Image (spheres, rainbow, N blue to C red):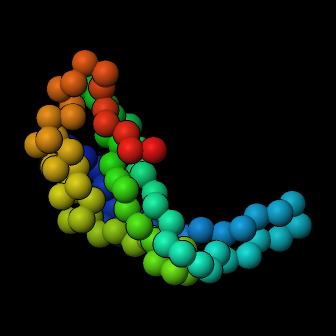
Amino acid sequence: MSHLIIPDRIVIRAHFWTPHSTTPYVGQPIAFNIRTFARAKNDYTLGPFFSDSAGVLALTRREFEYSAAGHLDAGAMTQPWGTLSLS
């Protein structure tokens, strides 16, 4: 995983948007997939990752690397159709 460039912490916050305002999301957890773009070979589509009830998803670098390693170990990168997407 040393070739991935990943920030120490990734935070996604869901909001309802209108042309005039945004309102923070509050409700059931939301499932997110994260798509990475590789410099060589295949891109990764990782997930699902689930937000909390406030619509906040926070991942550490380690959690993200574990997900990428699991994706690679599952053989999804060697399939003829490319990456595995759960979306």
Q: Reply above or below: 21 against 78.
A: below
Compared across the picture, whether 10 is left or right of 6 comes to right
Place of residue 52 in the rendered image (x, y in percent of width and height, measured from the top left): 46, 78
In the image, farthest residue toward the left: 73
From the viewer's perspective, tell me whether residue 54 is left or right of residue 35. Answer: right
Can residue 36 be seen from the camera position used here?
no
In the displayed structure, 13 sits above or below 4; it is below
**Image coords of residue 30 (percent x, y):** 50, 66
Question: Does residue 48 lie above or below 11 as drawn?
Answer: above
Which of the pair 6/82 is nearer the observer?
82
In the picture, measured across the screen, residue 73 lies left or right of residue 32, that is left
Q: Please report the residue visible at 18 percent of the width from the left and 58 percent of the height from the top.
A: 66
Q: Quadrant of residue 20?
A: bottom right
Q: Residue at x 30, y 26 (%)?
A: 82
Which quadrant of the figure contains the C terminus? top left
What is the quadrant of residue 7 in the picture? Answer: bottom left
Residue 12 point in image, percent of width and height = 50, 66
Residue 60: which quarter of the image? Answer: bottom left
> Who is closer to the viewer here, 39 or 23?
23
| Residue 27 pos. (x, y %) | 59, 78
Q: Residue at x 64, y 75 (%)?
A: 25
Left/right placement of residue 17 relative to residue 28 reads right
Name the residue at the front extreme.
28
* Residue in view at x 21 percent, y 31 percent: 77
Q: Decide: is 5 above or below 43.
A: below
Farthest top residue in view: 80
Q: Is residue 45 visible?
A: yes
Q: How many marks?
A: 0
